[in-house]
Amino acid sequence: MTAGPTLSELTLRARDIFRLVVEGFIDTGAPVGSKTLAGSGGVNLSPASIRSVLQELQDAGLLSAAHTSAGRMPTEFGLRLFVDGIMQVAEPSLAERTQIERGLAQGGTIESALAAASTALSEMSAGAGVVMVPRREPRLLQITFVALAPRRALVVLVAEDGGIENRVVDLADPVMPGVLEAAGNYLTARLAGRTLAEAATGIAAEITSGKSALDSASADLVRRGLAIWSRDSAQRPVLVVRGQANLLDDAAVQDLERVRQLLDELESVESIAHVLDAARVAQATRIFIGSENRLMSLSGSSVIATPWRDGDGRVVGVVGVIGPTRLNYARVVPMVDFTAQSLSKLIGQDGFSRP
């Protein structure tokens, strides 16, 4: 992203004009010209003086124009400066809070609550609402290895909630039944009552250091079992996307290729999961503008995302809005934040039924 001035380096009139251009662009999706600014009553300058300031802002990398006589629109750098230094975020309105809470209060499964949250955000933001639970991490009860063929074994995982999942593991060499039993007993003893993520690092370190009391065949089997479960879990996010049609507004007609690219990106669960995963470690709402997010840089889109937590305060997912860079950040940020708080409160109260 092009380097440019800080907010303190702008004159007051340049800052006012810059703010009006950004707000006008966010409101209409169209470039803002000097005549529009002069007629708005917000700038007490002649059109010629306004054009001079607009050129200065363009030279500074904050604004861009399709051609000399066109109006201006903010660059990605300009939008970042606006979001970080000028934008004033208010609390969601009563109507917005009511709409979010009404959707979540309908009850049902976790999946239905995620769909309700995503739908509410899409309807209010004019973007696509997204909610993600990166991975299902049940607390485990037992792991068993079952021979399928000389070089293949079935890994059976039993969770405390009664859920059962299994995966096939390819083996480098044939193993004896005793090896399978030893590997299963070892993992069960160390995983029982914990999630795989909580225990995997310690198990791997124990094996690497030689403190596991496993022979080489059993240790290799444990490694392969952990690897396939960890990889599979990371690739199976629960992702709910609603409101893609909102992206096809009147302004999008002028930029159909970008919208087509964004819609393609929204079809890729793995790509969106990677984007939202960057917000999981944040303590507050994250805003990615255009090329700041490598995975969505082709469409020049923005992402506003906030982590949501379970009753113990642990991050379990991310909620957000994806749309064009002219998203109304000041309005959408508090919506996303309130939705995350509402989801956290609901899951903390165990307000979901089980599928």
Image (cartoon, rainbow, N blue to C red):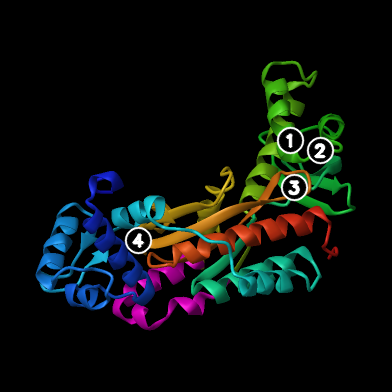
Q: Amino acid at mark 3?
A: Glu
Query: Badges 3 and 4: C-beta atoms under 8 Å apart?
Result: no
Query: Badges 3 and 2: C-beta atoms under 8 Å apart?
Result: no
Q: Which residue is mark 1?
A: 198
The correct choice, above or below, for 304 with respect to 65 in the image is above
Query: Badges 3 and 1: C-beta atoms under 8 Å apart?
Result: no
Dot 1 crowding, Cα within 10 Å, few <14, some 14–19, many 20+: few
- Left or right of 217? Residue 81 is left
The answer to whether residue 216 shows anywhere in this view is yes
Q: Give the structural element (helix, strand or loop) at label 2.
A: loop
Q: Amino acid at mark 2?
A: Arg
Q: CA distance from mark 2 to mark 1?
A: 6 Å
- Left or right of 351? Residue 17 is left
Q: CA distance from mark 3 to mark 4?
A: 33 Å
Name the outermost residue toward the front.
44
Query: What secondary structure characterizes most of the magenta part?
Result: helix
Q: Which residue is mark 3?
A: 137
Is 202 colored magenta in this rendering? no
The magenta segment is 242-266
Check residue 194 in the rendering and tell me which mark sits there, or answer none.
2
In the rendering, at what x and y percent does residue 18 appear? 27, 61
